Image (cartoon, grey):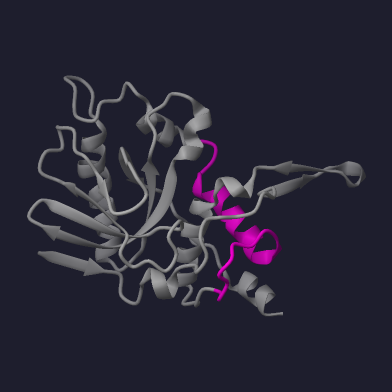
Amino acid sequence: MTSVRVPGFLPSTRGLHFPNAFPHVPNFTIDLPGGHSIPVGDAANGLCGGMAYTVRDLFEAGAVPPAVTTAPGSGPLFEYIAERLLESFDLPLGPATYLKLMHPRLPDGDLAILRGRAWRMIRVEWPAIRADLDRGRLSPLGLVKAKSRNPRDLGKNHQVLAWGYDLEGTRLTLRLYDPNYPDDDHVTMALDLAHPRRATPVTCSRGGTVWCFFRTGYRFKDPWPVLAALAR
């Protein structure tokens, strides 16, 4: 069996110590002339992508996560996570990947002229994820958790960080930092890589069904200014 871990990383020590359970507050506001503003989003719907990106930012910067155990509803840490959520979607084109992989007409296995979700996970995404982990880098993943053509269902999806893998023959187990389960070093996602043309179920230790996953386009952002603000 091949086992790889990102050196120095465990969710219990280098992840955020609070769950993805924010209060009902806007993700951010847009200021208007005359002192008015427009609230955008609802943090209670989840900021998982912002949390995953924040954790990778902190780890790459060599910074220890703040000792905060309750999800904030305001302040510099909240604002940073909300900004990183927006950036994790890679607007304007990023949501198109979710919508494509969510679409009910996309097969789980191949059709004669159409590659399915299994091919995407096994032949496209896994090599890129493995390259990250083999280089000692955390790998951010988008998890497709709904089959739907309705854009309103985008919020049913999820984002996590892969921090290691075990490969025994063709059986792959990815080890995950999941913002929904803080300080849990045992969250995993597994599948068999043997048949990329066939429907391939993904087994999750926590969090329910995953139909497909893909590596997202992370770019580093310096977290030290927000850490300095928290220390004041």
Q: Residue at x 10, y 43 (%)?
A: 194
Q: Is residue 33 above or below residue 67?
A: above
Quadrant where the N terminus lies? Answer: bottom left
Residue with the most extreme left position: 169
Q: Is residue 115 visible?
A: yes
Q: Picture coordinates of residue 173 (x, y %)?
A: 21, 56
Whether residue 94 is visible, yes or no, is: no
User: Where does the image place residue 83, in percent across and percent down from the top left?
Assistant: 61, 54
When the figure is inspected, residue 132 is found, relative to residue 146, above or below; the finding is: below
Residue lying farthest to the right in this orientation: 34
Q: Is 150 part of what is drawn in magenta?
A: no
Q: Which residues are magenta?
A: 66-94
Judging depth in this view, the residue of 118 and 26 nearest the camera is 26
Place residue 78 in its image quadrant: bottom right
What residue is drawn where x is 54% and y is 49%?
A: 46
Residue 84 in magenta stretch = yes
What quarter of the picture does the C terminus occupy? Answer: bottom right
Q: Residue at x 42, y 60 (%)?
A: 181
Question: How many marks are shown on the rendered structure?
Answer: 0
Direction from residue 121 to residue 224 in the image, left or right: right
